[in-house]
Image (spheres, helix red, strand yellow):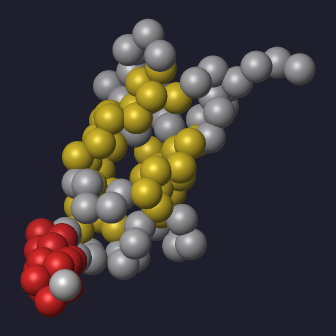
Amino acid sequence: MKYLIIASLLMAAASIAFSPTPPFTVKGTVSDNTGAAIPGVSVLEKGTGNMTLSDSAGHFQITVTSTNPVLIFSAIGYENKELELTGKSNVRIILTQALNE
């Protein structure tokens, strides 16, 4: 039992040690479900005013400042998407076209 507790503590410490600490830069690409880049996607760090837009190739870069950052991706004609970064610094986002009701 003592070894299980020690192993759990070591694993928790390792995950904290290897996770980026704020501020850190996140880079990525936004595309649709066919793989086509989506330019002009708003990339917002949830709970802050920190925002950027994807470029003509769908690429974006944002420096996040939160301890547990969540990015919100939104574009006209597409469903919004939230992503918890949990240590990720390079992401690929696929947005789904919004259904007209």
Q: Where on the picture, by quarter, is residue 74?
A: top right
**Above or below 18: residue 2:** below
Q: In this view, does 61 lie to the left or right of 53?
A: left
In this view of the protein, which residue sits in the foreground, 56 or 31?
31
Q: Considering depth in this image, is 60 or 10 the residue closer to the camera?
A: 10
The one of 23 and 69 positioned closer to us in this rendering: 69
Task: Locate the N terminus by quadrant.
Answer: bottom left
Farthest residue to the top: give it. 34
Front residue of 12 and 75: 12
Q: In this picture, is 8 found above or below 84?
A: below
Q: Where is residue 59 in the image (x, y as percent from the top left)?
A: 31, 35
Q: Residue at x 45, y 28 (%)?
A: 94
Is residue 43 visible in the rendered image? The answer is yes
Q: Is residue 6 above or below residue 14?
A: below
What residue is at 82 percent from the left and 18 percent from the top? 100
The image shows residue 12 at horizontal and vertical percentages of 21, 77
The location of residue 13, given as percent across then percent down, is 15, 81
- Whether residue 16 can be seen here: no
Rendered view: 15 above or below 94:
below
Can you tell which quarter of the image residue 77 is in?
Answer: top right
